[in-house]
Image (spheres, helix red, strand yellow):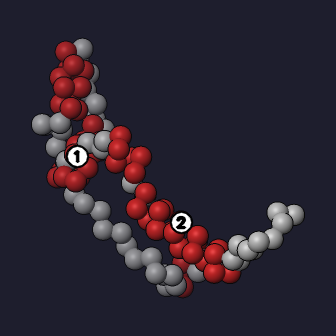
Amino acid sequence: MGHGHEHGAGHGHGKMELPDYKMWKVEGTPLEVVQQRLARRGLRDPWARNEAWRFMGKYAKSVTFSEVLFRGFKWGFAAFVVALGVEYVLFPPKKGGAHH
């Protein structure tokens, strides 16, 4: 009965390959400052390494306000033009008619 997992029915879900947790380093990130401040109080954040990926590689680039605002503008405008064209082809405006 179950959900099909016991019969080898993978449904396209293979074993997910996770990166080695040791590749993420706190050193050289803003988290290093946090760790230093915690250390002054005799504390440390054991989970800081799990957040280090946010400050490395392609994730390290800060996002500007204009990037957030206009991220989908190009595709949205293209969809608007297509929808406008379809509307004028399927429902052309009435010429010389009354508004009602």
In-image side of 18 versus 74 (left or right): left
| Residue 36 position within the rendered picture, expressed as x and y whole percent measured from the top left | 17, 23
In-image side of 32 versus 73 (left or right): left
The C terminus lies in quadrant: bottom right
Q: Is residue 48 visible?
A: yes
**Residue positioned most to the right:** 100
Label 2 residue SS: helix
Q: In which quarter of the image is residue 51?
A: top left
96 in relation to 59, above or below: below
- Mark drawn on residue 42: none
19 in relation to 33, above or below: below
Q: Distance between the residues labelled 1 and 2?
A: 30 Å
Q: Can residue 53 be seen in this view?
A: no
Instruction: Judge the density around disc 1: few (<14), some (14-19), many (≥20) Cα neighbours within 10 Å.
Output: few
57 in relation to 1, above or below: above
Q: Which residue is drawn at 22% across and 57% down?
A: 20
Looking at the picture, tell me which residue is in the foreground, 42 or 63: 63
Which kind of residue does numbered mark 1 sit on?
Answer: Lys
Which kind of residue does numbered mark 2 sit on?
Answer: Phe
Disc with the residue nearer the chain's start (1 vs 2): 1
Q: Quadrant of residue 83?
A: bottom right
The N terminus lies in quadrant: bottom right
45 in relation to 74, above or below: above
Q: Which residue is drawn at 65% across and 74% down?
A: 87
Instruction: Judge the density around disc 2: few (<14), some (14-19), many (≥20) Cα neighbours within 10 Å.
Output: few
Q: Name the residue under label 1.
A: 61
| Residue 31 position within the rendered picture, expressed as x and y whole percent measured from the top left | 22, 32
Q: Mark 2 points at which residue?
A: 80
Looking at the picture, tell me which residue is in the foreground, 56 or 87: 87
Q: In which quarter of the image is residue 17?
A: bottom left
